[in-house]
Image (cartoon, rainbow, N blue to C red):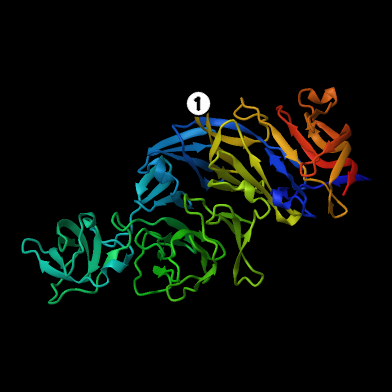
Amino acid sequence: MSDFIKTQTSFANGEVGPEFFTTDNINGLSCLENMDVLSGGGISRRAGLVSVAQLPGTARLFSFSVSDAQEYIVVLSNYRMDIYNRDAHIQRIITPWTYSEISTIQCAQRFNTMIFVHSECAPQILCKTDQGFQLTEFGFAKNLPDISVNAPFVRFDDSTDITITVTANQNSNNRATFTTNKDFWTPEKVYGIFSLLGCQWSIIEYIDARNVIAVANGIYTVPATPVSDWTEIAFSRYRGWPRSITFHQDRLIFGGTRSWPGGIWMSQVGRHNNFNTGTGLDDEATFVSLQSQQRQQIYTVVSSDNLQILTTVGEWAISNKPLTPSAVDIKQHTSVGSYSACYLPPQQIEGSTVFIAGNGRDIRELSLDDLSETYNATDLCALSKHLMGTPIGIAYNASLRRLYIVRQDGRMSVLNHNPSLGVSAWGTYNTNGQFLSVCVCDGRTYVIVQRTDGAYLEYFDTSALQDAGTYTFSYKASGLPLRASGHNVSNIKLKKITARIMNTKDININNHNISLPNEIYATDADGFTGDVSVNLLGTMCATMNPVWTIHGATPYPATVLSITMYGWYTI
């Protein structure tokens, strides 16, 4: 039997999975609950939650930054949008989305407007004006005061061999009957827009599967033969609407629809509602489609150093600078795929794009290699897969260097991430209730929490020692099983555990409450800083159990900088 003194001065790897308990050189923990890993490697009790408002039901959060002085939280619930400025409710707006649709809504912001997209609903624009907020349907730029629009037009696969015979209507100069050579028309295509004979046509009446009535936006000449050179508007109730959106190089980018899952539509430069490809000039709109052996369903598009396209089976990028119709260098870099059960917006973290992989258990960091030519997708949770669960929300607080993943079980997995200091530490947050959504606005981390009496909008605040001013929460950190001299230890007897703490007012070590000086409990007094110990008198410890556990449940601050263990062991 040998004596040992072992000190752990860093917890920079956070909670790791049991499969790593016997791995050397890991500054990890077997449990990290309601605590954060600090930049120096210590651990501290998490901030409490402050309640803002009760919500009408389950909801989802978005941040809307108009200016430094105008930072807003957008709360989407069933057919409803509530807008908050910090703690104040600003406005309520009726929306077209049900709660089930909200989970897959995506958005992009530019200045004082935010555009929301959903595959089954026309895009909506939220605009901040001097009079307040307005939600209107996205409209493509009109080039004439009629139905003509600068919308994107394509030829869908189910219409490649369809020809249209145009028969003029004797009672109207701009109406005609469209007759196809095969069954093609359906009632759902009424109000769809088609482009042929130099005009754009709106279908206004369904007759049967081969005949409809259409109205043109201009003068046309009836052709002598059926028309094979025609296109259909890319976005419609029948074909579906864009499911992803971003702004990139002053272009508005739409990605993927129900009928064209691999399509990427790019607006004209500076004219974000104009998708007219024109004659292919550098500033005109363009359209590309992902081509590979696998079906590419676009999950989202991201504006980073390049235009990144994340699909359900891989990660693509368009690297052209500037991006023009004549120069589109697009290629697939990795084959991870994105989680698609709900929309979890990729987070921009220090130049990298962090997204949740298709299996729902990997958090990948998409970044360029040293030559800035190829992307790699590094796994950020390789040591902590057991903490991932089923994700339903994600946000990153840059000021705290903290990534939040809301899980379906109502808990949050939290990554404290500071690569320059070697900190990449996962842990878990829980509260009296269930976390439903998370976002970051103006440096604050906001959450929606389902409590026993309803759903609430709340935010984390370091001055709050409880949740919502009512609920206490416990914290816990446990060490890894002991290893000594590069070996697994078979028998352990503990003599003493010493913790170096900072600004702490309550702490327990291995179920022993530590007595601290009375003067620290005076109003506005700092907590105790220094070493505290518990004598264990040769307590036996099972080899696969943690040797030490720090815990507490009272609403006081607690920070641990290091742990030292004293005892005997055999191998």
**Left or right placement of residue 453 versus residue 19 in this view:** left
Which one is in front, 497 or 195? 497
Q: Is residue 403 visible?
A: no
- Disc 1: which residue: 453
User: Which quadrant holds residue 231?
Assistant: bottom left
The residue tagged with tag 1: helix, strand or loop? loop
Residue at image point 43% right, 76% down: 326
Residue 531: image location, x then y, percent:
87, 36
Callout 1: 10 Å neighbours few (<14), some, many (20+)? few
Residue 78: image location, x then y, percent:
39, 38
Residue at image point 55% right, 52% down: 360
Residue at image point 44% right, 56% down: 244
Residue type at mark 1?
Asp
Residue 421: image location, x then y, percent:
75, 54
Q: Is residue 289 visible?
A: yes
**Left or right placement of residue 260 versus residue 158 in this view:** right
Q: How many numbered callouts?
A: 1
Q: Residue furthest left?
A: 170
User: Which quadrant holds residue 131?
Assistant: top left
| Quadrant into which the N terminus falls | top right
Which one is in front, 36 or 249? 36
Residue 339: image location, x then y, percent:
51, 54
